[in-house]
Image: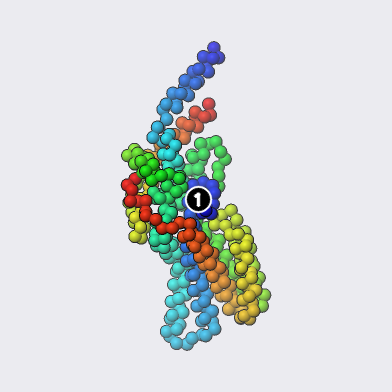
């Protein structure tokens, strides 16, 4: 009886893990989202230095996050310097919050 | 060699990033030097010509504007040419409540809530600039000849104590030149009024020197390279 209960709990946990947002769950993207949530905005170069990413890696992951509407990317000039500035959108913040709540739920069981 | 950024959360590192190149210290320090030097010059020579008085007034107003109003704009202009192409741009969080809320979410409820990042510009104004002005007032209040060294010692102690654990801490060795300079300036036997401005002059020069050392180290560690923005993220 007890074994059946434990199996059900494990199944429930597996089901919850499968429901995680895979776009957020990927470590590099999660790192980018978490970083952007703590600052107002950051440019490509700063993100690259902060996370130790390569240009191609960061570029690819940012594109995916932008396509999903989680990150807003703008080209702007600070003085004469062109900057690619990234900012977390409301959808991105919500997705990250949901992901954190799901993870917390899974880990607290 | 890695930059001496405050450890901790990304938000706190972003707040410390404002001081990575020493430019805020150079701008504020030079503003104080101009303000104090003009006051000392005016006090000594007391020019009677209209043009000299106007020049004095213009320097004083411009220096005050640099320190209190235009500092952020000037820093952003300089950083856009020097810092952003080298190490990037970040805008740290601007609201304490907002930061606390965000950190709670990020911690997943598993760790204790860490201290929110200090407000970089606000903190710089309320500590460094405030302390230098305190030195200016104190040197004017304490009678000569010991007023200047006492005021500079107090400034050094306050700068060291208030910045411990902040995003821009000062090592005790780096504040040591302040009382030493106060002792040296005491030998000039200036009047009490002049001493007040000399204290500000020394404080400003010290602040600018701190910034210059930091800037030289930063430029050496980060030679200019092609901007990464040429790659479309």
Above or below: residue B23 compared with residue A27: below
Image coords of residue B162 (percent x, y) = 60, 58
Image coords of residue A29 (percent x, y) = 41, 39
Residue at (45, 82) in percent of width and height: B53
Above or below: residue A70 compared with residue B137: above
Name of the residue lying farthest toward the right: B146
Q: Nearer the viewer, residue B33 or B118?
A: B33
Q: Secondary structure at mark 1?
A: helix
| Number of disc labels | 1
Q: Tell me: A68 left or right of B222.
A: left
Q: Nearer the viewer, residue B41 or A63?
A: A63
Res. A28 image quadrant: top left
- Residue B211 makes an appearance in the image: no
Residue that carries the numbered disc 1 in the rendered image: B13
Residue at (61, 66) in percent of width and height: B155
Colour mapping used in the image: rainbow
Residue at (61, 68) in percent of width and height: B177
Name of the residue lying farthest toward the bottom: B48
- Residue B139 makes an appearance in the image: yes
Image coords of residue A6 (percent x, y) = 53, 18
Image coords of residue A22 (percent x, y) = 40, 32
Q: Tell me: B163 left or right of B57.
A: right
Residue at (45, 84) in percent of width and height: B52
Above or below: residue A33 compared with residue B185: above
Q: Tell me: A30 left or right of B126.
A: left
Neighbourhood count class around disc 1 (C-alpha, 10 Å): few under 14, some 14–19, many 20 upward: many
| Picture quarter with the C terminus of chain B | top left
Numbered disc 1: what chain?
B
Above or below: residue A94 compared with residue B16: above
């Amino acid at each position: 009886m007890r074994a059946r209960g434990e199996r059900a709990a494990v199944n429930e946990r597996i089901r919850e893990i499968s429901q995680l947002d895979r776009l957020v769950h990927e470590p590099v993207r999660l790192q980018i989202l978490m970083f952007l949530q703590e600052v107002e905005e950051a440019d490509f170069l700063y993100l690259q230095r902060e996370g130790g990413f390569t240009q191609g890696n960061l570029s690819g992951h940012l594109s995916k996050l932008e396509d999903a509407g989680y990150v807003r990317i703008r080209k702007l000039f600070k003085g004469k310097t062109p900057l690619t500035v990234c900012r977390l959108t409301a959808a991105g913040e919500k997705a990250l919050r949901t992901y954190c709540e799901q993870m917390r739920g899974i880990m607290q069981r | 060699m890695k930059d001496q950024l405050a450890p901790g959360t990304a938000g706190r590192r972003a707040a410390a990033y404002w001081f990575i190149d020493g430019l805020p210290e150079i701008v504020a320090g030079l503003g104080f030097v101009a303000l104090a030097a003009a006051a000392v010059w005016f006090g000594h020579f007391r020019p009677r010509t209209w043009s000299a008085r106007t020049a004095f007034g213009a320097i004083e107003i411009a220096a005050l504007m640099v320190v209190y109003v235009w500092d952020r704009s000037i820093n952003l202009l300089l950083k856009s040419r020097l810092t952003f192409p080298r190490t990037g741009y970040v805008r740290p969080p601007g609201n304490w409540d907002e930061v606390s809320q965000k950190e709670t979410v990020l911690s997943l409820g598993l760790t204790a809530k860490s201290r929110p990042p200090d407000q970089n510009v606000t903190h710089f104004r309320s500590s460094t600039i405030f302390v230098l002005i305190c030195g200016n007032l104190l040197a004017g209040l304490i009678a000569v000849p010991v007023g200047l060294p006492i005021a500079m010692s107090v400034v050094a102690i306050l700068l060291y104590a208030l910045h411990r654990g902040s995003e821009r801490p000062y090592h005790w060795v780096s504040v040591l030149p302040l009382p030493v300079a106060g002792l040296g300036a005491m030998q000039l036997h200036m009047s009490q009024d002049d001493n007040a401005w000399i204290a500000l002059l020394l404080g400003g020069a010290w602040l600018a020197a701190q910034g210059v050392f930091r800037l030289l180290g930063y430029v050496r560690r980060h030679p200019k390279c092609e901007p990464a923005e040429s790659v479309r993220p």
